[in-house]
Image (cartoon, rainbow, N blue to C red):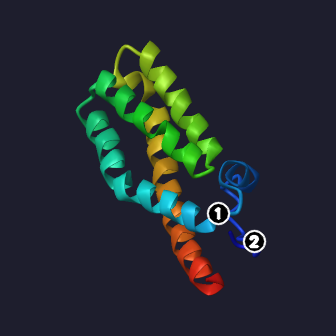
């Protein structure tokens, strides 16, 4: 474990990350890499379900990514996913939650960018302290 402290993006709950992983930055790097490995496919599944107006598939696709953002310490994004999942349960069609979905997809794209940036910073950080 490193004695140096990595400074996370302010969209990531650093206290939550440290509670889960302590200061095991190589492991956090691995977690972020794992998230990124499936991120594009997960986002595509949400967008595809939305385009096809398949409410149940959309709910399942959103449900699938909820833990992802917890692992990354992005609790606000995780909460937004839960809200949209719950709205999917009560909606009668995708058009009922259209604005929520547009907002969620924007959140997810921003989150993906942040996770990628943090992953690169973690790689550099871990290489500098090893």
Instruction: Give percent across and percent down for residue 106.
Output: 48, 49
Where disc 2 sits, the SS reads loop
Q: Residues within 10 Å of mark 2 (few under 14, many from 20)?
A: few
Nearer the observer: mark 2 or 1; the answer is 1
Instruction: Give percent across and percent down for residue 88.
Output: 43, 22
Going by the image, does 97 lie left or right of 80? left
Q: Is residue 61 above or below residue 36?
A: above
Going by the image, does 92 lie left or right of 114? left
Image quarter of the N terminus: bottom right
Instruction: Give percent across and percent down for residue 86.
Output: 50, 21
Question: Which quarter of the figure has residue 127?
Answer: bottom right
Nearer-the-camera pick, 45 or 32 = 32
Can you see residue 55? yes
Residue shown at 44% from the left, 26% from the top? 97
Instruction: Give percent across and percent down for residue 73.
Output: 63, 50
Residue shown at 34% from the left, 19% from the top? 93
Residue ranking furthest to the bottom: 128
Residue to which mark 1 is pinned:
24
Kindly identify which numbered label has been placed on residue 70. Answer: none
Q: Residues within 10 Å of mark 1 (few under 14, many from 20)?
A: some
Question: Which quarter of the figure has residue 24?
Answer: bottom right
Q: Is residue 9 above or below residue 78?
A: below
Going by the image, does 117 lie left or right of 34? right
**Image label count:** 2
First in sequence, mark 2 or 1: give its number: 2
Residue shown at 32% from the left, 22% from the top? 56
Where disc 1 sits, the SS reads loop
Residue to which mark 2 is pinned:
5
How far apart are the two marked residues, 2 and 1, measured between alpha carbons? 10 Å
């Amino acid at each position: 474990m490193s004695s140096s402290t990595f400074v996370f993006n302010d969209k990531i709950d650093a206290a939550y990350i440290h509670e889960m992983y302590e200061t095991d930055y190589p492991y956090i790097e691995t977690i972020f890499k794992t998230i990124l490995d499936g991120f594009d496919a997960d986002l595509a599944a949400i967008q595809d379900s939305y385009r096809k107006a398949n409410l149940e598939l959309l709910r399942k696709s959103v449900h699938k990514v909820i833990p992802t953002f917890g692992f990354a310490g992005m609790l606000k994004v995780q909460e937004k996913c839960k809200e949209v999942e719950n709205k999917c349960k009560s909606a009668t069609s995708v058009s009922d939650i259209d604005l929520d979905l547009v907002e969620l997809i924007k959140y997810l794209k921003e989150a993906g960018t942040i996770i990628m940036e943090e992953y690169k910073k973690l790689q550099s950080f871990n290489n500098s302290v090893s």
